[in-house]
Amino acid sequence: MIFKRLFDPRLAQSSYLLGCSSTREALIVDPNRDIDRYLEAAAQDGLRVAHVTETHIHADFVSGARELAQRAHARLYLSAAGGPDWQYRYAAEARATPMNDGDSITVGRIEVRALHLPGHTPEHLVFLVTDTEVAGEPMGALTGDFLFVGDVGRPDLLERAVGTRGTMETSARQLYHSLQRFREFSDYLQIWPGHGAGSACGKSLSAVPQSTLGYEKRFNWAFGVRNENDFVRAVLAGQPDPPRYFAQMKRMNLEGPRLLGQLPPTPRLAEDSLTSVLQSGSTVVDTRNPDEYGRGAIPGTINIPNTRAFPTWAGSLLPYDRELYLIVPEPGERRVDELVRSLAGIGMDRVAGYFGSDVVGHWRKSGGKLQTIPVVTLEQLSTRHRNGALLLDVRGAGEWGAGHIPGSLNLPIAELEARLDEIPRGQPLIVHCQTGARAAIAVSLLRAGGFDDVRFFRGGFAEWRAAGQPVGLSQS
């Protein structure tokens, strides 16, 4: 058996390739939208992608299963479990083979058997993998978002991200019973999860790429809670705010993602066209790091740095219904391709062009003013705060409730644009988060929203707390 884990660090997401060395067939499990990488991975081992499947309807990225199956002329398998509300609505059109509990996919001499283990989502499948050439029992399980290393998939997303009311507790109880069923398998069973640290599909995922069921039964907190009611309380407590774009992804993957095809090259635009782009109301994203942006940026642009978290913040903050433009540091071509693929991976297909970072200098030389973002140190913070500045904390509500700088106003960054009217105009603002990354983005959103006197406390709550400063707690 040929086995490959294909990891996307920006989504903290794992896809898997299973190949039979005898028949040269391959199965791809949980592909994202960058399907060329799966075809290339198969070709490297002389394999043909003959089968494509996924564990569940994803909420954090656009599925590539439909497009990969079409491009490779492969057979598509989709879950038919979970009830009528959670059936893939494009399954018949795509001629997908339905998968229920106990059904199998045969990949040469490899058997891949489905287990219906709901909880994270109603239709969720886990795939037991058996290399029948050498064994009669499974060697491992592709657990998707059911079981991670050190954690389990969160059961609250249908309610909190998608808006399906009253499903959190029901899903949590389903997850508990799914774990009890799964714990009966052998301890040596390898665990190959769908996500690692950095994903918002759980609250304490490990960066370790795989584990064993025996290890998880001993050290994963979820297996240690043997009372159902205690488990429900524990699994729902402390879940981070789901990114805003999760609801969009869920709908898109349920209905069937648009077939993307080959992405066309993104055109580089002339510097003097930026004015008309901004005047048209289009969104311009400056992907430079926050320090560069803070030293001089074009008014009206949004700063989302080109880091691993780029797709998460782009999906949470940028519009899906308007054209997007990028400002990309030199040399830009490869970076542009990576950024465009990242955006396509979360369903943002409307990148109309990009500017090199020299557009900033061109703007200044042409008589345009640049905005700067002053930085506030810890020593300066308390003085400025006492002198009338409003301290704005853009962390999640749960983070703020667990500890915050006294007197701060909490507006989570994903809600910021929709709640700008809650911020007093004409009052100086000092923006912070935990360690600075979110606050840097928030400052640019505020400047684009018409707030002129905005400063950035880079150290954030982490530095405040480490210095032994007083900490406020939520009254709830």
Image (tube, rainbow, N blue to C red):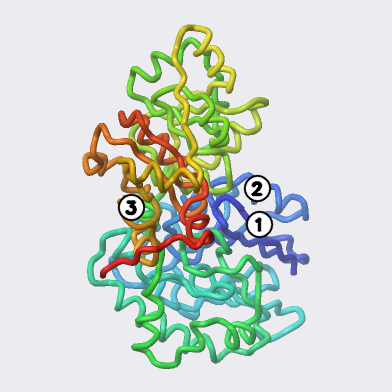
> What element does badge 2 sit on?
helix
> Residue at label 2?
37
Which class describes the residues within 10 Å of circle 3: few (<14), some (14-19), or many (20+)? some
Q: Nearer the viewer, residue 339 or 313?
A: 313
For the residue marked with disc 3, what is the amino acid? Answer: Ser
Mark sitting on residue 408 = 3
Where residue 399 sits in the image (x, y, percent)?
A: 40, 62
Indicate the position of residue 171 as horizontal and vertical percent values.
34, 76
Confirm or deny contact between disc 2 and disc 1 (CB under 8 A).
Answer: yes
Q: Secondary structure at mark 1?
A: strand
Labels 2, 1: front one: 1
Q: CA distance from mark 3 to mark 1?
A: 42 Å
Gap between marks 2 and 3 measured at Cα: 46 Å
Name the residue carrying label 1.
6
* Foreground disc of the pair 3, 1: 3
> In the figure, 298 relative to 416: above or below?
above
Q: In the figure, 173 relative to 376: above or below?
A: below
Residue 311 lies, with reference to residue 211, above or below; the image says above
Task: Name which residue type carries label 2.
Answer: Arg
